[in-house]
Structure formats: structure tokens, C-alpha cells
Amino acid sequence: MRRKIGLVYGGTHVGLMGMLADAVLRADGEAVGVIPERLMGREVGHKGLTKLHVLRSMHERKALMADLSDAFVALPGGFGTLEEFCEVVTWAQLGLHAKPCGILNVFGYYSPLLAMFDHAVEERFPEGRKQGASAGAGLGAGTAPSTGGVASDACREVAGSGDKMKEPMTNPRRVECLTSKCESIPMRTFTQPEPLTDGELDRLGDFLKGCKGGKAMNVEALDGFFAALIAGPETVMPSEYYREVFGGEMSDTCEFTSLDEANEILGLMMRHWNTIAGTLFKGEVYVPLLLEDEDGTAQGNDWARGFMRAWACATMAGVSLSTTRSPADA
């Protein structure tokens, strides 16, 4: 809602989309529903929306939803979600629209589908961009906390986007990265959290230590920072706070030697986020990552600083991290 992005969806008050619509309305956002008469007759229409269009058929419903939308994002769903998403991707491939098509890959739900897209392209069933198709249309995927997976190059080719990445350091993990140029970084899919090894933690720590300006967090502070954001009442993406982690804009502080190194470092951060979130959301005991000093003592000061830094960020954004809810309810 902070980005003034409204919601256009199927207009029901049930299921995941009904919950999303309620959340949008609670945040004073705009939620527009498009529903056929038959579903209204079953009393599943959402009566509290900003606007609700009631149409005669499913075909009219999908056509109006496509016309009202500036981009398409598929949340986890069933056959209807898959059918509608594949349809708008097909329309992009045919050049009927130039709107981004994205997948929110919650807990790796869509990882098998992304793999299937890759397989289909490898077998040469989906063609490349049709002649006359817009270069703006692109397919990508973003993640939510404790999730994994972004679309590979092959997946983007399904949608007909042949554009080259121009800004590989730009927030690759947020859904908003699915711009008309689809400038997201392809990353490896993680269907389940994979805790970082000691060597990987050292690698991440060394990179953070080498960031320009000397204001980047160390891995202990990063651990506390992520824990506070994940346990807070507002769903956030780690990429929203890269500036805090790196001590400034990534373009100013990070010296990635290659796209592979960018993938590696951001992938390590995402895996660590996933590990923390997976532990908290399962209600398991979370053990903070504490570094030992020269005397072999783990004091936890940096962890506390990272935690409080997240608190300060959320407070400045108008959100209080103080809540009586358990992490599993966050």
C-alpha cells in the first residue's frame, strides 16, 4: 500500500484472495473485484470492496480483469489460478499485451511449475517471442518470507521477453522487480530453507566487511535484524531493507565482481532469512547467531543492535514491532 498499488482480483470473500482483499482494505488500499453472476448467486462475492463488477460470464470476467490490471501476479492457488496465469502469459507471448506476469513462489509452491516451464522450453514446445510481440512483456517470480525461487532465463523466454538485464543489483527478490523490463536477477530455487554452513557464513561476513563506507552489518547484526523483521506484524521482503544491511545503496556500497557473485551473496542472505523464518513460523526454538570475540565470548551486542535497527526502520515506516502475537501468527 505504501507504493500505491491497488488490487484487481476475482471478487470473492473466500480463500487466499479474499484474505488478501481484506488486508488491502484494512490498509486503506483499493481493492476491485470482478465476479460472474453465477458466483454472486452462491453468496461468495465480497461486498466490502472499493468496487465490485458483476458480469455475465467467466470470459467477460477474465477480459475485464486483464483490462483493469497493469501487471499479473499469481499467488498459490489451484487449477483456476494456473489456467488464468498461463492464459495471460500466452497473451503476452502473442503480443496481445505488454504487461509483466509474475509468480509469488511461497514456500517453493511454484518451483515444480517453474521447472516444468524450463523443461518445456528445453524441449522447444513454447516458441520464442512472436513477431510483433512487445519487448516489454516478461515473466518472472518473486518470493515471500520463507520462500524460494525466481524464474530462470528459460521461464522468461516463455513470456517472450528477450530483454537483457541492465541493473543486476536492483532488489531482485521483491515482486515489484517485475517491471516492464523484467530486470530481476535469476537465482537458484530453494524449495526448503538450507541453513548456511560455517564456510558460507564466513563468506557472507567477509563480503559485508568489505562493503564501502564501513557501515554494513556483520552476520550477527544481520541475524538479529532479520529475526526482528520476520517476527514483526507486517510482512516484509528482505530486499526492502538491503540499504540498511549494506550501509547504503547497493550500487554505492557493494562491489560485485560478476553477476555470479551477486547471485551468490544475495542467495546466501535469502537462505539465512529462510532459515530464521522457517524456524519461527514452525514454532521451533530459534537460536540467535552470535559471534565470539577474541576471548571466545559471545556477547550478543551486535545481534541486539541489528534487532533494534529493524525496530527503528519499522517505526519510521509507521509500523510498530511491538505485538502480543506469536511468530507463528505473524
Image: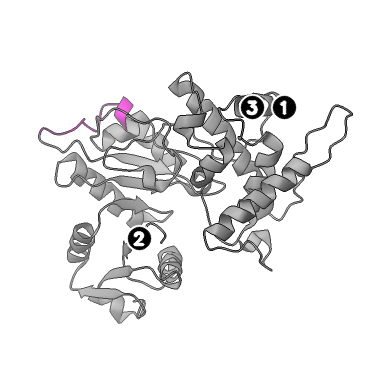
Amino acid type of the residue tagged 3 in the rendering: Lys
Q: Nearer the viewer, mark 1 or mark 2?
A: 2
Q: Is residue 299 above or below residue 75?
A: above
In magenta, the rendered stretch is 120-131
In the image, 222 versus 32, the foreground residue is 222
**Which secondary structure lies at badge 2?**
loop
- From the image, tell me which residue sits under label 2: 4
Would residue 145 be visible to someone looking at this image?
A: yes
Q: Is residue 63 above or below residue 118?
A: below
In the image, is 39 to the left or to the right of 91? right
Residue shown at 32% from the left, 70% from the top: 11
Given the current orientation, which residue lies at the most extreme front position? 213
Which residue lies under the disc numbered 1? 198
Residues packed near mark 2 inside 10 Å, few (<14), some (14 to 19) or many (20 plus): few
Q: Residues within 10 Å of mark 1 (few under 14, many from 20)?
A: few
Front position in the image: 129 or 242: 242
Q: Select label 1 or label 3 by which is in front.
A: 3
Q: Tell me, yes or no, whether the two marked residues, 3 and 2, touch with CB atoms within 8 Å.
A: no
- Relative to 321, 259 lies left or right: left
Rendered view: 283 above or below 194: below
Instruction: Answer whether residue 37 is magenta in the image.
Output: no
Q: Amino acid at mark 2?
A: Lys
Q: Residue at x 73, y 43 (%)?
A: 303
Q: Mark 3 or mark 2, which has the lower sequence index?
A: 2
Q: Alpha carbon of mark 1 to alpha carbon of mark 3: how far?
A: 16 Å
Please name the residue that numbered disc 3 is placed on. 209
Kind of residue at badge 1: Asp
Side (left or right) of 201 relative to 103: right
Image location of residue 266, percent across then percent down: 53, 33
The quadrant in which residue 112 appears is top left
Report the quarter where the C terminus lies: bottom right
Q: Quadrant of residue 64?
A: bottom left
